[in-house]
Amino acid sequence: MTPLSINPDKRWMGIFCGLVSALIWGAFPVVTRLGLTHTPLDAYDITFIRYTVSGLILLPLLIRSGLMGLGWKAIALMVVGIGAPYMVVVSLGLSMAPVEQFAVVTPGSMILFSVAISTWGLGARISAQAIAGIALIIVGVGLIGYQSFASSDVSPYAYLIFLLGGLLWAVYTVSSKHFNTSPMHATSIVSVFSMILFLPVYLAGRGLQIVHAPLWDIGVQVVYQGVLVSTIALFFYSKSVQLLGSSVGATFAALVPGAAVVLATVLLGEQSSTGAIVGILIVTAGMVLTILQKQPARGAT
């Protein structure tokens, strides 16, 4: 299903939801790296804050709705895809590399992995224009990959970690559509089960030492990670995927790079390389081609 093969009202609602989630997520790598590099918090602390807060917020909703027929396979795929495992992975990457690397590699590779899983795993079909857009995304992500492995200033290990993050995100994107979960229910499943799984592990290893961190540092992560990213942005993203399909809905993530790099420059003082800027422009162009494909893709999701 493509944006132009569905009801216009639903199409524009899907685009609106995608834009909202992209704008919120654009600040995600900046706020996360700010916490990792300018506060005593580490990847595990931020993951703990993110899912404890969002899990508690959404627990009453999940208790009221129940699992709604979702099996453990579906729950596991969604939680691993964009829950605590995803957060730990990308946080570790952001502790090793600047925002620009995450901003191109993880959203861009997520789009590629989402289309690959939808096409080869679920039998979806996409248009020639979308294929051209995907080709541009590959070029942009590949450019950053070349820089990572050729430059001593950028960690190649972080690049691989960010690729893994893109794969995990794609698993959630396709799973939430395939199992036909409502946006709010999918958000509740991810947050609550991440809390259930990660909270005991974190407390066993760290105890309550996080309470000794500055209250302001904790508060910033509580509001942004626990409320804005894990609850509001994930809901709008899930709604966009539901309305537009996983292959097309995923392309809004390509708006994240530009927003992230601008915010990183303003808030972190990180200066982007020419290669990174070119990569961002190429990936964004690929997103535009994919989202504006004019030929309905028969059988696409």
Image (cartoon, helix red, strand yellow):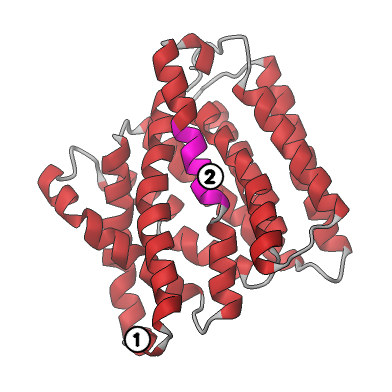
Of 87 and 274, nearer the camera is 274
Quadrant hosting residue 268:
bottom right
Q: Residue at x 79, y 67 (%)?
A: 154
Q: Which residues are magenta?
A: 17-26
Q: What residue did someone put label 1 on? A: 211
Counting residues from the N terminus, which is met first, the one under dot 1 or under dot 2? 2
Left or right position of 101 against 297: right
What is the CA distance from the residue labelled 1 to the residue labelled 2? 30 Å
Q: Is residue 234 magenta?
A: no
Q: Position of residue 232 (x, y in %)?
A: 37, 47
Above-or-below relation of 210 to 164: below
Q: Position of residue 220 (x, y in %)?
A: 44, 69
Left or right position of 11 against 58: right
Q: Magenta segment, principal secondary structure? A: helix
Residue neighbourhood size for the residue with mark 2, other residues' Cα within 10 Å, grouped as few (<14), some (14–19), many (≥20): some
Q: Residue at x 46, y 24 (%)?
A: 244
Of 223 and 183, nearer the camera is 223
The image's mark for residue 23 is 2
Above-or-below relation of 162 to 67: below
**Residue flagged by tag 2: what amino acid is it?**
Leu
Left or right position of 154 against 222: right
Quadrant hosting residue 280:
top right
**Residue flagged by tag 1: what amino acid is it?**
Val
Q: Is residue 19 magenta?
A: yes
Q: Residue at x 72, y 38 (%)?
A: 283
